Image: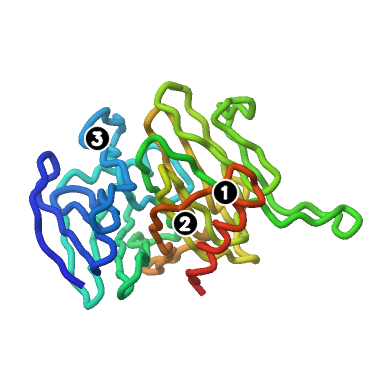
Amino acid sequence: MTNEIINLDGWGNCLKLSNGVVELTTTLDLGPRIIGFNLMGGKNILNPIGKVDPIVTDFGDFYTYGGHRLWHAPEGKPRSYVTDNDPIKYELTETGAIFYYNFEKETGMEKEFSVSLEENSPTVEITHTITNRNIWPVDCAAWALTIVAPGGRFIMPNEPFIPNTVKLLPARPVVLWNYTNMADPRWTWGRRFTILKNDANILIPQKAGFMDKLGWACYEKEGTVFMKHFNFYEDAEYVDYGCNVETFTNGTFHEFETIGPLETLEPGDLTTHTEKWSLYDNVNLPDDEDGMEKVLTELADKVSIY
């Protein structure tokens, strides 16, 4: 594993990590945000937006910045929008680094995430940690939000088909927001997959959430597949009526989100949520769902998070 400090215009100092297969770039002068994830010589699958369009809150101006960030759920304003515009601390490890958010004095919560690059592999493990530094308990979940490159499509695997003669009970929730329009042309509500395309020409927000028991979902763009793996805990409680995966789009903006279990953190307690990211290029996804399922299942089976 190699590491180097680079200076990027508009971002300042950043740490670039590589295992010779993939590169991962994280900001140091703000955030932190992972603003780059690419195969060696390949295009960035993330979307580093920059310091534009602040969200004004009682805590100050929050900038999304783009790329990957850690929040605590459930979403609330201003609680979720604590500003992170200042330089941060980090620590190199044998296989990656740990990035520390500045302490959220407004909420009393402490956040960090660690990245670990697997040897000779297109896979990176990211562990998100939130610690309650208040003197009272707090209900929260670790929420990993990734803004991906425009022009692709989020692909969510549906539960395996089982006829009603065999199983009568529901398989999982699909959660809608007040502004969700299931007739929007960016949605495909398929038999094996639910797909949300990113379309720069449609400036209408769309969002949906899912209980994903299969432990993976992905984003595909021009033959590159960005796959996330994560644990699902059968007995856990999840926010937003039971979601551990959510996706949001509006114009070129597109988020691919996963969420850990909702927990009551006593003072000093912490919660963690781990994702494994993998990148595959030159992937030919068939138009038919059976063919798509075969290709994506083969990719999903390459990685285990358990």
User: Does label 1 or label 2 sit earlier along the sequence?
Assistant: 2
Looking at the rendered image, the disc whose residue lies closer to the viewer, 2 or 3, is: 2
Write down the residue under mark 2: 141
What amino acid type is highlighted by mark number 3? Gly
User: Does label 3 or label 1 sit earlier along the sequence?
Assistant: 3
Residue at point 37%, 61% (across, down): 130
One can see residue 143 in this view: no
What amino acid type is highlighted by mark number 2? Ala
The CA span between labels 3 and 1 is 35 Å
273 and 247: which is toward the camera:
247
User: Does label 2 or label 3 sit earlier along the sequence?
Assistant: 3
Q: Which mark is residue 107?
A: none
Write down the residue under mark 3: 60
Classify residue 116 by image quadrant: bottom left
Locate residue 125 relative to residue 100 in the image: left or right. Answer: right
Of all residues, the one furthest to the bottom in this rendering is 94
Classify residue 114 by image quadrant: bottom left
